Amino acid sequence: MWMFFFLTFVFLFVLLFFFSCPFLLKVHAPDVPMIKIAEFDKYHHELEKDPAVQEMPVQSMITSPSPHEIVASIKKGHKTIYVKGVAWGGGGSGVNRVDVSLDGGDHFTRAELIEKPIQEHRQSQWSWQFFEKEIPIPAELREKLEKGEQVDLTLSSKCFNTAWNVQPSEPNYNAHGCCVNHWYKVPVTLDPSISENQDPPVCCESPYCNKPSGGKFTKPFVHSKTCLDEESS
């Protein structure tokens, strides 16, 4: 019997405590606009229809050379440029292959996947996959380098996971999750007059730079025009 009275007392005490402390039941956010990806405050009626994203999508990026780095082409005899990076299959999927490009994605070549030091089971591959590649420099660009001219390149990569899902070339927006997985582009300059690579400048003039490295995505984060825009105009 005493247990019944004790539990009743506890229940009433908890009820009284919560009802006498309304500040515990409410959270007041400041009345400020929500400026987020794809201008959430302006297009939230449309964007809120998308479900939340629970898994990181397939993605990859080149980590070396750094964006805007000046690469000494003489080190490779003006024949190749060495790139390396990381890839992710997404949702536990593995990485089947990674393709790399030196012309912004117009032409790709297959990179080598570096063997992982651990063994992961199918659909449980949560670690990053490292990749590397000596990308051959086309003959017309080699001629420029041999004449002493600088050559600008735009490095990029795209990843295929074990379900053969591939990174998109352009962004697909989702206001409820991280879906920025389109081709990451790395501008670099080949210089035949230097013997060692030179670090990139710290600053970047573009408003869409990935500070502080200076890397940039293919498109700025702006909302695509829809029928809602037609109705409001």
Image (tube, helix red, strand yellow):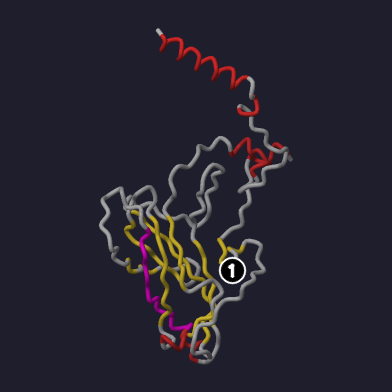
Q: Is residue 175 above or below residue 219?
A: above
Q: Is residue 136 above or below residue 89?
A: below
Percent across and percent down for residue 114 are: 31, 67
Q: Is residue 39 above or below residue 170?
A: above
Front in this rendered view, residue 140 or 115: 115
Which residue of the protein is positioned furthest toward the top in this rendering? 1
Q: Which residue is mark 1?
A: 214
Q: How many numbered marks appear?
A: 1
Percent across and percent down for residue 151 are: 53, 81
Q: Residues within 10 Å of mark 1 (few under 14, many from 20)?
A: many
Q: Which residue is pictured at 46% across the width and 10% down the height?
A: 5
Asked if residue 43 is among those painted magenta in the image, a careful observer would answer: no
Q: Left of 32 or right of it: where is 49?
A: left
Front in this rendered view, residue 14 or 112: 14
Q: Which residue is pictured at 46% across the width and 68% down the height?
A: 63
Front in this rendered view, residue 205 or 13: 13
Q: Which residue is pictured at 74% across the width and 40% down the height?
A: 233
Asked if residue 138 is among those painted magenta in the image, a careful observer would answer: yes
* Type of the residue with mark 1: Gly
SS state under label 1 = loop
The span picked out in magenta is: 128-141
